[in-house]
């Protein structure tokens, strides 16, 4: 029976600011994978926290990982934020196209002795 071991970097470590997958890489070679990433709903916490961060990324070892060994998992093509990134990119492009169609006019007041003759 495998025991559950949790790794927490030291308090001042840069990993705390680098995101969920900062300590694992994708070697693109399935033989080297030694973990898998799952997204699970938060449980046992208050509703406000669940609304703020509804899913939690958990990295599970699929075999024993030796001390000092690099952690690898399959990033896959179905990245969790890829859809959001593509949607933001689409909206930015639409906004840029919409701004191109706007006619920009600059008002310049008539100077002394200029303008239409009455």
Image (cartoon, grey):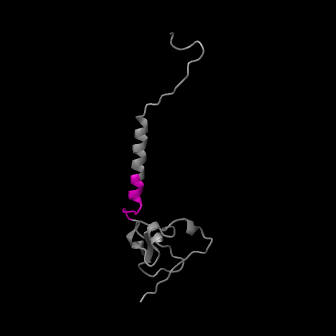
Lateral position of residue 1 relative to residue 9, left or right: left
Residue 46 in the image: x percent, y percent? 47, 74
Judging depth in this view, the residue of 102 and 1 nearest the camera is 102
Q: Residue furthest left?
A: 78
- Could you tell me residue 51's position as x and y percent? 44, 67
Q: Which residue lies furthest to the top in this view?
A: 118
In this view, the residue farthest toward the right is 12
Q: Does the magenta stretch include residue 63?
A: no
- Most extreme residue toward the bottom is 1
Above/below status of 108 relative to 52: above
Residue at horizontal 60 percent and vertical 15 percent from the top: 112
Q: Residue shown at 42%/55% (left/top)?
A: 85
Q: Give the range drawn in magenta.
A: 76-87
* Up-down relation of residue 26 to residue 63 (above or below): above
Whether the magenta-drawn stretch holds residue 82 is answered as yes
Residue at x 58% of width, y 12% of height:
113
Quadrant where the N terminus sits is bottom left
- Name the foreground residue: 87 vs 78: 87
Image position, residue 6 (x, y; %) = 51, 80
User: Could you tell me residue 75's position as x and y percent?
Assistant: 41, 66
Using the image as rendered, state which of residue 59 and residue 74 is in the foreground. 59
């Amino acid at each position: 029976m495998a025991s559950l071991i949790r790794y927490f970097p030291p308090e001042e470590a840069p990993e705390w600011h680098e995101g969920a997958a900062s300590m694992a890489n994708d070697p693109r070679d399935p033989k080297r994978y030694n973990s898998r990433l799952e997204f699970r709903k938060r449980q046992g916490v208050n509703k406000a926290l669940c609304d703020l961060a509804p899913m939690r990324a958990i990295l599970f070892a699929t075999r024993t990982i030796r001390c000092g060994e690099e952690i690898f998992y399959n990033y896959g093509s179905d990245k969790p934020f890829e859809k959001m990134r593509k949607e933001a990119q689409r909206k930015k492009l639409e906004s840029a196209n919409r701004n191109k169609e706007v006619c920009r006019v600059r008002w310049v007041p008539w100077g002394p002795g200029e303008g239409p003759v009455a």
